[in-house]
Image (cartoon, rainbow, N blue to C red):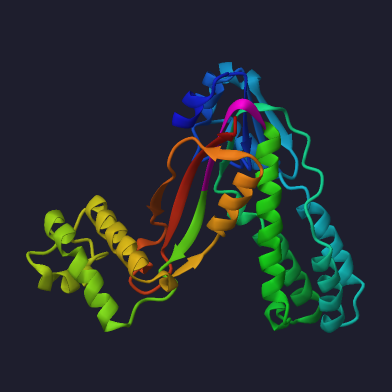
Amino acid sequence: MHAANLAARREVATVLGAGAGSELPLAELAGRFDRLVLVDLDGPSMLRSLRQIPRHLRSRVDLKIVDVTSFASGLIESTARAVESSSSAAESFQRLGRILDGLQAREPPDLPPSDLVVSSLLLSEIPRYPFSFAAQAVDDRFGVAIQTWERSDDFYRRLVEVAVDDHVQLMVDLVRPEGVIYFSDTVARGLAQHSDDGAVRRAVEARAAPHFIQLGLADSASDVAPAVNRLCRAQHSPRTEAAAFERLLSLYRDADDRFFEPLLPVSALRDRSTQRGLVLKESPTSWWWLAYPCRIRSGSGAFLVSNWILGLRD
Protein backbone atom coordinates (compact mmCIF):
# COMPACT_ATOMS: atom_id res chain seq x y z
CA MET A 1 0.00 0.00 0.00
CA HIS A 2 3.01 2.32 0.25
CA ALA A 3 2.98 2.85 -3.53
CA ALA A 4 -0.75 3.63 -3.40
CA ASN A 5 -0.07 6.36 -0.86
CA LEU A 6 2.31 8.05 -3.33
CA ALA A 7 -0.36 8.47 -6.04
CA ALA A 8 -1.52 12.07 -6.35
CA ARG A 9 -5.07 11.02 -7.25
CA ARG A 10 -7.25 8.15 -6.03
CA GLU A 11 -9.55 7.60 -9.01
CA VAL A 12 -8.35 4.44 -10.81
CA ALA A 13 -6.04 1.59 -9.78
CA THR A 14 -5.26 -1.14 -12.31
CA VAL A 15 -3.81 -4.52 -11.38
CA LEU A 16 -2.19 -6.33 -14.32
CA GLY A 17 -2.22 -10.13 -14.21
CA ALA A 18 -4.46 -10.02 -11.15
CA GLY A 19 -5.28 -13.74 -11.13
CA ALA A 20 -6.50 -14.83 -7.74
CA GLY A 21 -4.75 -11.84 -6.17
CA SER A 22 -3.49 -13.88 -3.25
CA GLU A 23 -0.38 -11.73 -2.71
CA LEU A 24 -2.14 -8.37 -3.20
CA PRO A 25 -4.12 -6.13 -0.80
CA LEU A 26 -7.15 -5.96 -3.09
CA ALA A 27 -9.62 -5.05 -0.36
CA GLU A 28 -7.47 -2.10 0.70
CA LEU A 29 -7.06 -0.96 -2.92
CA ALA A 30 -10.82 -1.13 -3.49
CA GLY A 31 -11.32 0.97 -0.37
CA ARG A 32 -8.67 3.50 -1.38
CA PHE A 33 -9.58 4.07 -5.06
CA ASP A 34 -12.88 4.98 -6.72
CA ARG A 35 -12.37 2.23 -9.30
CA LEU A 36 -10.26 -0.92 -9.17
CA VAL A 37 -9.59 -2.64 -12.51
CA LEU A 38 -8.41 -6.27 -12.35
CA VAL A 39 -6.90 -7.58 -15.59
CA ASP A 40 -6.16 -11.19 -16.47
CA LEU A 41 -7.04 -13.87 -19.02
CA ASP A 42 -8.08 -16.20 -16.20
CA GLY A 43 -11.64 -15.17 -15.43
CA PRO A 44 -12.36 -17.86 -12.78
CA SER A 45 -9.27 -16.82 -10.81
CA MET A 46 -10.36 -13.20 -10.84
CA LEU A 47 -13.78 -14.20 -9.57
CA ARG A 48 -12.01 -15.83 -6.64
CA SER A 49 -10.04 -12.63 -6.09
CA LEU A 50 -13.31 -10.72 -5.94
CA ARG A 51 -14.25 -12.70 -2.84
CA GLN A 52 -11.39 -11.03 -0.97
CA ILE A 53 -13.16 -7.70 -1.34
CA PRO A 54 -16.02 -6.73 1.02
CA ARG A 55 -19.43 -6.79 -0.64
CA HIS A 56 -20.02 -3.08 -0.16
CA LEU A 57 -16.87 -2.32 -2.21
CA ARG A 58 -17.38 -4.78 -5.08
CA SER A 59 -19.33 -2.26 -7.17
CA ARG A 60 -16.04 -0.38 -7.56
CA VAL A 61 -14.30 -3.38 -9.15
CA ASP A 62 -14.13 -4.02 -12.91
CA LEU A 63 -12.93 -7.39 -14.18
CA LYS A 64 -11.22 -7.24 -17.58
CA ILE A 65 -10.67 -10.70 -19.10
CA VAL A 66 -8.02 -9.77 -21.65
CA ASP A 67 -4.45 -10.64 -22.55
CA VAL A 68 -2.15 -8.20 -20.73
CA THR A 69 0.31 -8.49 -23.64
CA SER A 70 -0.01 -7.29 -27.20
CA PHE A 71 1.52 -10.43 -28.68
CA ALA A 72 1.05 -13.64 -26.65
CA SER A 73 -2.42 -14.66 -27.85
CA GLY A 74 -1.52 -14.08 -31.49
CA LEU A 75 1.78 -15.90 -31.06
CA ILE A 76 0.07 -18.94 -29.59
CA GLU A 77 -2.41 -19.04 -32.47
CA SER A 78 0.43 -18.78 -35.00
CA THR A 79 2.39 -21.49 -33.18
CA ALA A 80 -0.59 -23.86 -33.20
CA ARG A 81 -1.09 -23.37 -36.94
CA ALA A 82 2.63 -23.77 -37.66
CA VAL A 83 2.92 -27.08 -35.82
CA GLU A 84 -0.40 -28.46 -37.03
CA SER A 85 0.43 -27.74 -40.69
CA SER A 86 3.92 -29.29 -40.47
CA SER A 87 4.70 -32.85 -41.52
CA SER A 88 7.78 -33.18 -39.30
CA ALA A 89 9.42 -31.65 -36.27
CA ALA A 90 12.10 -30.17 -38.52
CA GLU A 91 9.46 -28.40 -40.61
CA SER A 92 7.69 -27.13 -37.49
CA PHE A 93 10.98 -25.71 -36.22
CA GLN A 94 11.51 -23.94 -39.55
CA ARG A 95 8.06 -22.41 -39.28
CA LEU A 96 8.65 -21.42 -35.66
CA GLY A 97 11.91 -19.78 -36.75
CA ARG A 98 10.04 -17.59 -39.23
CA ILE A 99 7.57 -16.65 -36.49
CA LEU A 100 10.50 -15.82 -34.21
CA ASP A 101 12.10 -13.59 -36.84
CA GLY A 102 8.90 -11.54 -37.17
CA LEU A 103 8.00 -11.44 -33.49
CA GLN A 104 7.40 -7.97 -32.08
CA ALA A 105 5.15 -6.08 -29.70
CA ARG A 106 1.91 -4.75 -31.19
CA GLU A 107 -0.99 -2.59 -29.99
CA PRO A 108 -1.46 -2.82 -26.20
CA PRO A 109 -4.82 -3.79 -24.69
CA ASP A 110 -7.39 -1.03 -24.21
CA LEU A 111 -7.30 -0.21 -20.49
CA PRO A 112 -8.13 2.99 -18.58
CA PRO A 113 -5.55 5.62 -17.60
CA SER A 114 -4.63 4.86 -14.00
CA ASP A 115 -3.34 6.64 -10.93
CA LEU A 116 -1.82 3.37 -9.69
CA VAL A 117 -0.60 0.54 -11.94
CA VAL A 118 0.33 -2.73 -10.24
CA SER A 119 2.38 -5.46 -11.91
CA SER A 120 3.17 -8.16 -9.37
CA LEU A 121 4.93 -11.45 -10.20
CA LEU A 122 3.74 -11.18 -13.80
CA LEU A 123 6.44 -10.20 -16.30
CA SER A 124 8.74 -13.17 -15.60
CA GLU A 125 5.81 -15.51 -16.34
CA ILE A 126 4.81 -13.97 -19.68
CA PRO A 127 7.51 -15.61 -21.87
CA ARG A 128 7.02 -19.03 -20.29
CA TYR A 129 3.49 -19.65 -21.48
CA PRO A 130 4.06 -19.28 -25.26
CA PHE A 131 7.35 -21.19 -24.99
CA SER A 132 5.72 -24.02 -23.02
CA PHE A 133 2.83 -24.06 -25.48
CA ALA A 134 5.22 -24.43 -28.41
CA ALA A 135 7.18 -27.16 -26.61
CA GLN A 136 4.01 -29.10 -25.78
CA ALA A 137 2.60 -28.74 -29.29
CA VAL A 138 5.77 -30.12 -30.92
CA ASP A 139 6.04 -32.93 -28.40
CA ASP A 140 2.37 -33.91 -28.74
CA ARG A 141 2.51 -34.01 -32.54
CA PHE A 142 5.99 -35.40 -33.19
CA GLY A 143 7.30 -36.69 -29.85
CA VAL A 144 10.29 -34.36 -30.11
CA ALA A 145 11.60 -32.02 -27.41
CA ILE A 146 11.86 -28.38 -28.42
CA GLN A 147 15.34 -28.30 -26.84
CA THR A 148 16.58 -30.35 -29.83
CA TRP A 149 15.96 -27.28 -31.99
CA GLU A 150 19.19 -25.29 -32.32
CA ARG A 151 17.25 -22.04 -31.98
CA SER A 152 15.24 -22.95 -28.91
CA ASP A 153 17.37 -20.75 -26.62
CA ASP A 154 17.08 -17.89 -29.12
CA PHE A 155 13.32 -18.42 -29.17
CA TYR A 156 13.05 -18.01 -25.41
CA ARG A 157 15.46 -15.07 -25.28
CA ARG A 158 13.46 -13.27 -27.95
CA LEU A 159 10.24 -13.94 -26.02
CA VAL A 160 11.82 -12.32 -22.97
CA GLU A 161 12.98 -9.29 -24.99
CA VAL A 162 9.56 -8.73 -26.53
CA ALA A 163 7.81 -9.29 -23.20
CA VAL A 164 9.99 -6.67 -21.49
CA ASP A 165 9.46 -4.10 -24.27
CA ASP A 166 5.74 -4.80 -24.37
CA HIS A 167 5.20 -4.67 -20.61
CA VAL A 168 7.17 -1.48 -20.05
CA GLN A 169 5.22 0.22 -22.83
CA LEU A 170 1.92 -0.96 -21.35
CA MET A 171 2.81 0.50 -17.94
CA VAL A 172 3.88 3.78 -19.57
CA ASP A 173 0.63 3.95 -21.55
CA LEU A 174 -1.52 3.31 -18.48
CA VAL A 175 0.01 5.47 -15.78
CA ARG A 176 -1.20 9.06 -15.49
CA PRO A 177 1.35 11.92 -15.35
CA GLU A 178 1.28 12.07 -11.54
CA GLY A 179 0.54 8.39 -11.11
CA VAL A 180 2.62 5.58 -9.65
CA ILE A 181 3.69 2.15 -10.91
CA TYR A 182 4.36 -0.65 -8.45
CA PHE A 183 6.42 -3.32 -10.18
CA SER A 184 7.46 -6.50 -8.38
CA ASP A 185 8.83 -9.70 -9.85
CA THR A 186 11.13 -12.65 -9.40
CA VAL A 187 14.48 -11.78 -10.97
CA ALA A 188 16.57 -14.83 -10.03
CA ARG A 189 16.20 -18.36 -8.70
CA GLY A 190 18.72 -20.26 -6.64
CA LEU A 191 20.71 -22.04 -5.84
CA ALA A 192 20.78 -23.00 -9.52
CA GLN A 193 23.58 -25.41 -8.64
CA HIS A 194 24.87 -26.06 -5.17
CA SER A 195 28.44 -25.04 -4.49
CA ASP A 196 30.80 -27.98 -4.25
CA ASP A 197 33.69 -25.56 -4.32
CA GLY A 198 35.21 -25.90 -0.86
CA ALA A 199 36.77 -22.44 -1.03
CA VAL A 200 33.47 -20.73 -1.85
CA ARG A 201 31.58 -22.75 0.73
CA ARG A 202 34.12 -21.99 3.46
CA ALA A 203 34.12 -18.29 2.57
CA VAL A 204 30.32 -18.15 2.74
CA GLU A 205 30.23 -20.01 6.04
CA ALA A 206 32.88 -17.72 7.52
CA ARG A 207 30.91 -14.63 6.53
CA ALA A 208 27.70 -16.22 7.84
CA ALA A 209 29.20 -16.95 11.25
CA PRO A 210 28.25 -13.69 13.02
CA HIS A 211 24.66 -14.02 11.81
CA PHE A 212 24.40 -17.70 12.80
CA ILE A 213 25.86 -16.92 16.23
CA GLN A 214 23.38 -14.06 16.68
CA LEU A 215 20.51 -16.40 15.74
CA GLY A 216 21.69 -18.95 18.27
CA LEU A 217 22.45 -21.55 15.60
CA ALA A 218 26.20 -21.69 16.22
CA ASP A 219 28.65 -20.87 19.01
CA SER A 220 31.62 -20.13 16.75
CA ALA A 221 32.67 -19.98 13.10
CA SER A 222 33.61 -23.66 13.16
CA ASP A 223 30.03 -24.53 14.12
CA VAL A 224 28.44 -22.96 11.00
CA ALA A 225 28.86 -25.96 8.67
CA PRO A 226 27.18 -28.40 11.11
CA ALA A 227 24.50 -25.76 11.79
CA VAL A 228 23.70 -25.54 8.06
CA ASN A 229 23.29 -29.31 7.95
CA ARG A 230 20.88 -29.17 10.90
CA LEU A 231 18.50 -26.77 9.12
CA CYS A 232 15.13 -28.23 8.07
CA ARG A 233 15.21 -30.86 10.83
CA ALA A 234 12.60 -29.21 13.05
CA GLN A 235 15.25 -28.15 15.56
CA HIS A 236 14.62 -24.39 15.19
CA SER A 237 11.67 -22.07 14.64
CA PRO A 238 10.61 -21.37 11.02
CA ARG A 239 11.49 -17.70 11.48
CA THR A 240 15.01 -18.52 12.64
CA GLU A 241 15.59 -20.94 9.79
CA ALA A 242 14.22 -18.44 7.26
CA ALA A 243 16.65 -15.80 8.51
CA ALA A 244 19.53 -18.29 8.20
CA PHE A 245 18.58 -19.29 4.65
CA GLU A 246 18.17 -15.67 3.56
CA ARG A 247 21.65 -14.86 4.84
CA LEU A 248 23.20 -17.87 3.10
CA LEU A 249 21.45 -17.03 -0.19
CA SER A 250 22.63 -13.43 -0.10
CA LEU A 251 26.20 -14.50 0.64
CA TYR A 252 26.26 -17.10 -2.13
CA ARG A 253 24.89 -14.53 -4.56
CA ASP A 254 27.58 -12.04 -3.52
CA ALA A 255 30.24 -14.73 -3.88
CA ASP A 256 29.29 -16.04 -7.32
CA ASP A 257 26.26 -15.21 -9.51
CA ARG A 258 26.55 -18.51 -11.35
CA PHE A 259 24.76 -20.25 -8.49
CA PHE A 260 21.59 -18.36 -9.45
CA GLU A 261 19.47 -18.64 -12.58
CA PRO A 262 18.40 -15.21 -13.89
CA LEU A 263 14.65 -15.02 -14.57
CA LEU A 264 14.49 -11.45 -15.84
CA PRO A 265 17.14 -9.30 -17.55
CA VAL A 266 17.15 -6.57 -14.91
CA SER A 267 19.57 -4.31 -16.80
CA ALA A 268 17.46 -4.47 -19.97
CA LEU A 269 14.31 -3.81 -17.95
CA ARG A 270 15.93 -0.79 -16.32
CA ASP A 271 17.18 0.53 -19.69
CA ARG A 272 13.79 0.11 -21.39
CA SER A 273 12.06 1.85 -18.50
CA THR A 274 14.45 4.80 -18.72
CA GLN A 275 14.12 4.99 -22.52
CA ARG A 276 10.32 5.09 -22.25
CA GLY A 277 10.38 7.93 -19.76
CA LEU A 278 10.03 6.11 -16.44
CA VAL A 279 12.02 7.07 -13.35
CA LEU A 280 12.43 5.45 -9.97
CA LYS A 281 10.57 7.27 -7.23
CA GLU A 282 12.44 5.34 -4.54
CA SER A 283 15.42 2.99 -4.43
CA PRO A 284 14.47 -0.59 -5.40
CA THR A 285 14.19 -3.16 -2.64
CA SER A 286 14.73 -6.93 -2.78
CA TRP A 287 13.77 -9.90 -0.64
CA TRP A 288 14.02 -13.68 -0.78
CA TRP A 289 10.87 -15.71 -1.36
CA LEU A 290 11.67 -19.05 0.25
CA ALA A 291 9.39 -21.23 -1.86
CA TYR A 292 11.09 -24.55 -1.01
CA PRO A 293 13.61 -23.73 1.73
CA CYS A 294 14.60 -27.32 2.47
CA ARG A 295 15.82 -27.69 -1.11
CA ILE A 296 18.19 -24.76 -0.89
CA ARG A 297 21.15 -26.83 0.29
CA SER A 298 21.00 -28.98 -2.85
CA GLY A 299 19.04 -27.08 -5.51
CA SER A 300 16.67 -24.27 -6.44
CA GLY A 301 14.47 -23.45 -3.51
CA ALA A 302 14.28 -19.66 -3.40
CA PHE A 303 13.42 -16.70 -5.60
CA LEU A 304 14.90 -13.22 -5.41
CA VAL A 305 12.05 -10.69 -5.68
CA SER A 306 12.76 -7.10 -6.69
CA ASN A 307 10.31 -4.26 -6.00
CA TRP A 308 10.32 -0.99 -7.94
CA ILE A 309 8.18 2.12 -7.52
CA LEU A 310 8.17 4.13 -10.75
CA GLY A 311 6.57 7.17 -12.30
CA LEU A 312 6.74 9.21 -15.47
CA ARG A 313 9.63 11.63 -15.87
CA ASP A 314 8.52 15.24 -15.33
Point out residue 80 in the picture as x, y percentages from the top left corner.
Answer: 84, 65
- Tell me if I can see residue 132 in this picture: no
Foreground residue among 85 and 43: 85
Position of 82 relative to 176 (above/below) = below
Position of 298 relative to 279 (above/below) = below
Position of 307 relative to 179 (above/below) = below
Point out residue 37 in the picture as x, y percentages from the top left corner.
Answer: 66, 29
Q: Is residue 44 left or right of residue 255?
A: right
Residue at the (64%, 35%) spot, across then down: 47
Residue that extends furthest to the front in the rendered view of this protein: 314
Q: Is residue 253 left or right of residue 204?
A: right
Point out residue 137 in the picture as x, y percentages from the top left corner.
Answer: 78, 70
Over which residues does the magenta segment extend?
A: 175-184
Point out residue 31 in the picture as x, y percentages from the top left corner.
Answer: 53, 19
Foreground residue among 75 and 293: 75
**What kind of secondary structure does the magenta stretch mostly adopt?**
strand
- Tell me if I can see residue 210 in this picture: yes
Q: Is residue 217 left or right of residue 24?
A: left
Residue at the (83%, 54%) spot, across then down: 74
Q: Is residue 150 left or right of residue 270?
A: right
Query: Which of the 4 image quarters holds residue 200?
Result: bottom left
Query: Which of the 4 image quarters holds residue 199?
Result: bottom left
How many marks the image carries: the answer is 0
Foreground residue among 286 and 132: 286
Query: Which of the 4 image quarters holds residue 171?
Result: top right
Quadrant location, the C terminus: top right
Would you say residue 26 sits in the magenta stretch?
no
Residue at the (77%, 42%) spot, across then down: 108
